[in-house]
Amino acid sequence: MYKKWMAGLGAGLIVAASVQAGPTLEAVKKKGFVQCGVSTGLPGFSAADDTGKFTGIDVDMCRAVAAAIFGDADKVKYTPLTAKERFTALQSGEIDMLPRNTTWTYTRDTSLGLNFTGVNYYDGQGFLVTRNLGVKSALEMDGASFCIQAGTTTELNLADYFRSNKMQYTPITFDTSDQTIKAFEAGRCDALTSDQSQLYALRIKLQDPSSAMVLPEVISKEPLGPVVRQGDDEWFNIVKWSLYAMINAEELGVTSANVDTMKGSTTDPNVRRLLGLEGVKGEWMGLPDNWGYSIIKMVGNYGEAFERNVGMGSPLGISRGLNALWSKGGIQYAPPVR
């Protein structure tokens, strides 16, 4: 009876997957690449070098999805988008996914026809000031002017913070993050406010990065993650589980360097399921069984992606903090592959 029930459950899962199959994967396979929306240039998250090669923790999300589908992480094309352009580009079908340092909020998740697939970076809004301003806290900035990128959650967060603390301020908005840091460096505002990760990324663009400092206040919750269109559950699952595969791989100790060895020798059922060796089927998402293996081999686990792009070994030098695994003092946590 138990075997019959399990067989029925498996069949039900496969039927459900086929019923929910959507058009995005088919279109991606037909054109032969994933079209990814990224920032106009934010070091550590998504930025192109002089040769046009994109790198960053958000770029690695695009590469992970391409690896899962094609077994080739380079089958990606990138569309740089401003904050004001990003949602329209996804809604219109110009891009397939948006892993562009975008905050998951109620409004965005319910009113735009979009779904957030997870969190690849837990962040919070902060303040960047010049050291010679002599300010040690945002609470000392009553009447100050702030450089802000338009079309972001930054504007509302700043308004809420100053209102709740009965202070006044002057916003100066710009379309791109590059414009905000150039204006800050030119002295057009007293401070620049954005997600703390972005502040660290923008600070290294200054002629003298040591001349500026990030204040200690974190005034908001900014869970950043990839976004897809609503109505295509198959594609939603692919993007979601590409991230979860990377987080699970770090927890299980599977890296791009040891994945081949573990594939050939491990008896750990958790690792074997992650690598497509037993139990779960890639066909439930329209993918080959080794989709998880391909992600880890070609992109690495979450910890690898974090460290090379934004971690202490990168120019940004950001500690893991909340982005450490749940088992190591952070809150990064993924459902199990089983």
Image: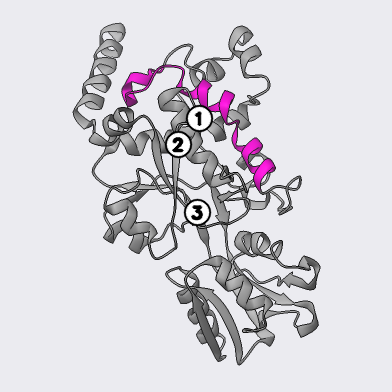
Q: Percent from the top left, x then y, of residue 174?
A: 50, 75
Give the mark nearest the N terminus, 2 or 3: 2
Q: Kindly indicate whether the residue at mark 2 contacts the one at mark 1 (C-beta within 8 angstroms).
A: yes
Q: Residues within 10 Å of mark 1 (few under 14, many from 20)?
A: many
Residue picked out by circle 2: 76
In the displayed structure, 108 sits above or below 78; it is below
- Which of 278 and 24 lies nearest the eye of the viewer? 24
Q: Is residue 303 magenta?
A: yes
Tell us which disc is closer to us: 3 or 1. 1
Q: CA distance from mark 3 to mark 1?
A: 22 Å
Category of crowding for the residue at label 2, using alpha-carbon neighbours closer than 10 angstroms: few (below 14), some (14–19), many (at least 20): many
User: Could you give the CA–CA distance between mark 1 and mark 2, rounded to whole angstroms?
Assistant: 7 Å
Q: Which element type, helix, strand or loop, lies under badge 1?
A: loop
**Residue placed most toward the observer, 65 or 165:** 65
Magenta span covers which residues? Answer: 280-309
Q: Residue at x 41, y 37 (%)?
A: 239
The crowd level at tag 3 (other Cα within 10 Å; few <14, some 14-19, many 20+) is: many
Magenta span: predominant SS is: helix
Q: Which residue has dot 3 on it?
A: 224
Kind of residue indicated by mark 1: Ala
Nearest the viewer among 328 and 177 is 177
**Sequence-first disc among 3 and 1:** 1
